Amino acid sequence: MSICIADLVTVRARNPQAIAEAAARRARRPLIGDSGRLMIVAADHPARGALDVGDRRLAMANRADLLERVCIALSRPGVDGVLATADILEDLLLLGVLDDKIVLGSMNRGGLAGASFEMDDRFTGQRAEDIERLRFDAGKLLLRIDYDDPGSLRTLESAARAVDEMAARRLPLFIEPFLSRRVDGRVRNDLSTEAVTRSIAIASGLGGTSAYTWLKLPVTDDPDGMAEAVEASTLPAVLLGGEVGADQAGTYEKWRAALRLPTVQGMVAGRPLLYPAEGSVETAVDTAVSLVTSL
């Protein structure tokens, strides 16, 4: 699919109401489809200033290229939907590619990558009321917790209120939890079994109810530790794809093992599928779908 940025800009400039109109007529589907699994493509990185893929620092900066990759991914059999910020989701609405797809709005984007305030991850993206108004299907928040950074407390509190606001609307909310720390001034996520287990326990207890809460979890550094980590909660979970790596085959094998765990219901992956280290978007997406649906 060839993306014409000029056409999108023209609609945005002359008929901004077209976005709400497209949202109102979008055909919707249940969160869990016939396969009983979820395969979601993530494209919410740019709003955090995270534009790099591997050693390409601005790989995700070209919006036409990003949209084209997302559209290709959404066209592949077995892909259930997309996770993104309002600007990207609204472009996709105008392109007409979100019918019968699950749409997740990304909610907190204030903790900009590399910023001194990165752990004070305020909710500068879509609110629960926006997700409801645009008839999207769920929300997602990132919950990074640094025990040495007071900004994490504000993040925890605002995340709990987001859980409440989404539950009040009976909208699912996917929480992506990490224990994090700064190493040489940069935030690093701890993927040890103990850290992932603690992050799951903390995220599961947020808010006045967990009835509509899902978890979006990384695979632990020790693949055998993933089974132990997910025992910390009964909440349904999806795996996150993580960073693009050279060992793509090894990444797929880690996903395959984690997808067999009883609480894991599918996957939300972004850069490894949209910007694969090897091969095409189609091949990367089809491989991920086969891992999710073949269990």
Image (spheres, rainbow, N blue to C red):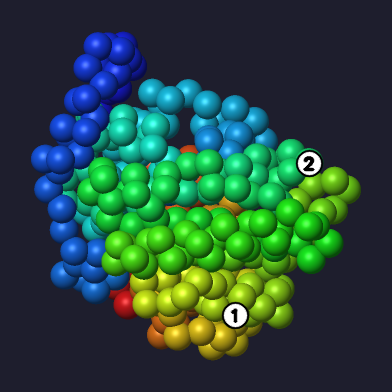
* Residue 226 figure quarter: bottom right
Task: Return the residue nearer the eye: 16 or 242.
Answer: 16
Q: Earlier in the sequence, mark 2 or mark 1?
A: 2
How packed mark 2 is, by other alpha carbons closer than 10 Å (few <14, some 14-19, many 20 or more), is few
Looking at the rendered image, the quarter that the N terminus falls into is top left
Q: Residue 114, image x and y in percent? A: 73, 40
Looking at the rendered image, the quarter that the C terminus falls into is bottom left
- Do callouts 2 and 1 mark residues in contact (Cβ within 8 Å)? no
Secondary element under disc 1, as helix, strand or loop, is helix
**Residue occupying image coordinates x 34% and y 45%:** 130
The residue identified by callout 1 is 201
**Residue occupying image coordinates x 52% and y 77%:** 204
Q: Is residue 261 left or right of residue 72?
A: right
Q: Residue 180, image x and y in percent? A: 73, 61
Q: Residue 121, image x and y in percent? A: 63, 49
Q: Is residue 269 left or right of residue 134?
A: right
In three-dimensional space, the C-alpha distance between marks 2 and 1, rounded to whole angstroms, equals 27 Å
Secondary element under disc 2, as helix, strand or loop, is loop
**Residue occupying image coordinates x 28% and y 55%:** 137
* Residue 195 figure quarter: bottom right
Viewer can see residue 166: yes
**Residue occupying image coordinates x 61% and y 75%:** 202
194 lies above or below 61: below
How packed mark 1 is, by other alpha carbons closer than 10 Å (few <14, some 14-19, many 20 or more), is some
Q: Which residue, as the protein is rendered here, is positioned at the far right?
A: 184
* Residue 109 figure quarter: top right
Viewer can see residue 189: no
The residue identified by callout 2 is 116
Q: Is residue 218 left or right of residue 13?
A: right
Q: Is residue 125 left or right of residue 265?
A: right
Q: Residue 209, image x and y in percent? A: 43, 77
As shown in the figure, which amino acid type bears the numbered disc 1? Ala
